[in-house]
Image: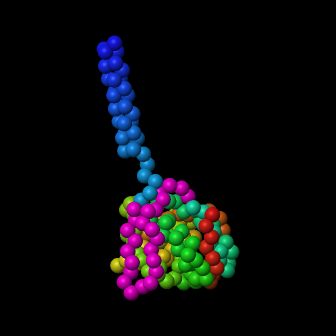
Amino acid sequence: MRHWKRVVAVLLVAAVALVVEGWVVRAQAAPTFFKSCQYVRTPGESGRPPYSLAPTIGLVKVTVRTNRGDLVLTLDRGAAPCAVHSFTYLALKRFYNQTPCPRHTRAILECGAGRPGYHFTPELTGHETYPHGTVALSNTVGLGNTAAFFVLPADATLPPTSTIIGKVTAGAAVLDRQPTTIQEVLLG
């Protein structure tokens, strides 16, 4: 009878060890659902940065309502989680509402005048390309990313220094009309 109890105890310990080992392996291979971002307050400016944990999965639909029509964007959290998190945070705070797009040419529409009070390091691979419809953050010299973003109405050859956050999915005709002012930015 004692032999039977030992066999059961050994089997029980082995089963627990296999379960724990499986949990450890799955935890190591599991995708990371959040990234810790380093948003740095800009001296002399007011404005609070978003929380540092940014989601890393999913797409975000954004409608940019302008005086020239609606521009619909799809932002990719997986490609640039900190940048998309910052953009959506500012949109929810209505930071972009009633702002001009100060740079509008046939090659670029740049919007988001003003600074949010913080900056962060660009999320770059070094192999960025900027095809028609690309949405990216403007890179401010000495600060990195802030709030300004741009949309490309045509393919562009640019150095890989701007964080790509998504693409235009509808309303591209807005890119041909100027001057443009953002009335509001809506998420979802």
Q: Quadrant of residue 181?
A: bottom right
Asked whether 136 or 188 is in front, the reply is: 188
Magenta range is 36-59
Q: Residue at x 37, y 31 (%)?
A: 16
Residue that protrudes farthest toward the top in the picture: 1
Residue 75 shows up from this direction: yes
Q: Position of residue 46 (x, y in %)?
A: 44, 84
Q: Position of residue 125 (x, y in %)?
A: 38, 60
Asked whether 63 or 180 is in front, the reply is: 63
Above or below, 127 against 46 in this view is above
Q: Residue at x 31, y 15 (%)?
A: 2
Q: Position of residue 54 (x, y in %)?
A: 46, 62
Asked whether 178 or 91 is in front, the reply is: 91
Q: From the image, give the main secondary structure of the stretch colored magenta.
A: loop
Q: Quadrant of residue 142?
A: bottom left
- In the rendered image, which quarter contains the N terminus? top left
Residue 7 shows up from this direction: no
